[in-house]
Image (cartoon, grey):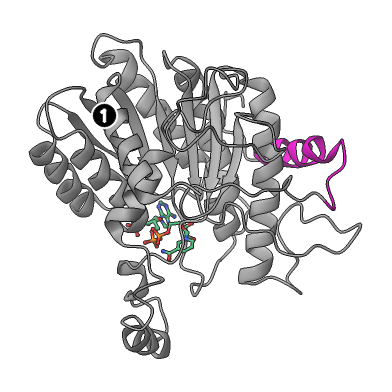
Amino acid sequence: MPQLNAIRTGVAELAKGPPLVVALVGATTGIGSYVARALAAAFAKDGSKLRVYIIGRKPDRAETLVQFGRQTSPGSDWRFVPVSDASLMSDVDQVCRHVAELEEESPFAGGPPRLDVLYMSQALSPFQKSPTTKEGLDTQMSLLYYSRIRFIQKLTPLLRAAPGSARVISIFAGNMEDSIKPGNLPIGTPPASSYGITDVRKHVTFMKTFLFEELVEQNAGKISFVHIYPGLVDGPGFYSDVIPLWFRIIWRVLKPLLSWYITSEKDCGEVMLFLATKRYPAKDTVTPETGANVIGGVAYSTQRDLGGGAYAVGQRGDESKNVSWAKVRKSDTAKEVWDHTTSILAETQGENDSI
Ligand SMILES: NC(=O)c1ccc[n+]([C@@H]2O[C@H](COP(=O)([O-])OP(=O)(O)OC[C@H]3O[C@@H](n4cnc5c(N)ncnc54)[C@H](OP(=O)(O)O)[C@@H]3O)[C@@H](O)[C@H]2O)c1
């Protein structure tokens, strides 16, 4: 497991590298906002600059973050790109087109129109009701999985244009593997009879692991894909009105007792930046020799390939010692997940638009 000092060294190295164009979806509050603040802090000094797209619903919160970024990291370019509802594919398509237009209009720091890193942390609180969207998807399943895959698909041309290999980083439940009954793969939205926190996590994490493995094959040398469990991270989500009062009271009482277990905003932001370093390379871009000096040691993929390009990691960016979902995986599991996902996304295809 990478130690915090290695993580900080890795982040400092990142800031000495080339300028980066970063998009953060769901960053107006919580972990996405900690990533934005960590970016501003890491790129605060002389050296490389950033362009950051804050993609979210709340202009006032986004503006606070943009102001923080401009003050902390002068010379970097901080932009708010509004999205009305990221659980809707039509809105995702629109915001992705907007980002592509902005990049085409004025590429950053002499490079091509591109995205070097895409972070996604959009989600409902697990305590919130998850209605069916007007496009027919369960809202939480969409925010955690379908909408995130849609962002990836629509932004792939920009990600592939990154001069170094690009990173896609999805923040939710990374390396958590809930038990699966044989012959009952968790593909799709959980049925109403079992729908709940555990089943949603199982379906999302399972599908994301295999879909990322498929995407890696299509983007070898170009994009790596990481999903991460951030640990228990305190934030406004624990005090929001959508949380039942009893939980808010219990949380305030337990928080001091759990302080050793809670990941701070700062540490969380730094770990998320560490995922953009060379420790998590695109497939076929490192060998044991070229990766020998990488800070923290090159990560193993979900198929236990060194630098394999698809990573499922825990709260310190640590990968499992085993092949992910080893007991249930078959040679065609990734294809099964791919076929399911592309058929769901095709059903919500925008007019005159292709996946
Ligand atoms: N915090 C933890 O302890 C913890 C632990 C394990 C896993 N996670 C996972 O990590 C991820 C981030 O967690 P977090 O604590 O940062 O959550 P959070 O504070 O609730 O933030 C979620 C973000 O999603 C955005 N969002 C929600 N619905 C949206 C919609 N329909 N359209 C656009 N944006 C929408 C919110 O935007 P607004 O600002 O507009 O509301 C907010 O910025 C989630 O997947 C969560 O499940 C968190």
Establish whether ligand 1 lies closer than 8 Å to the Cβ of label 1. Answer: no
Amino acid carrying label 1: it is Ala
- Quadrant containing the C terminus in the rendered view: top right
In this image, 330 relative to 56: left or right? Answer: right
Which of 125/183 is in front?
A: 183
> Can residue 346 be seen from the camera position used here?
no
Q: In this view, does 264 lie above or below 66?
A: below
Query: Which image quadrant is residue 181 in?
Result: bottom right
Q: Is residue 90 magenta?
A: no
Disc 1 marks which residue?
A: 15
Q: Mostly what secondary structure, the magenta segment?
A: helix
Which of 13/313 is in front?
A: 13
Residue 214 position, x and y percent, is 71, 31
Residue 91 position, x and y percent, is 45, 41
* Element assignment for label 1: helix
In this image, 177 relative to 333: left or right? Answer: left
> Can residue 251 be seen from the camera position used here?
yes
Q: Is residue 261 above or below residue 27?
A: below
What residue span does the magenta drawing correspond to? 327-345
Residue 101 position, x and y percent, is 35, 20
Residue plotted at (39% across, 18% down): 114
Which of 44/343 is in front?
A: 44
Residue plotted at (12% across, 25% down): 46
Within-10-Å neighbours for mark 1: few <14, some 14–19, many 20+? many
In this image, 22 relative to 44: left or right? Answer: right
In this image, 161 relative to 70: left or right? Answer: right
Q: Quadrant of ligand 1?
A: bottom left
Query: Which image quadrant is residue 108 in?
Result: top left
Q: How many labels does the image show?
A: 1
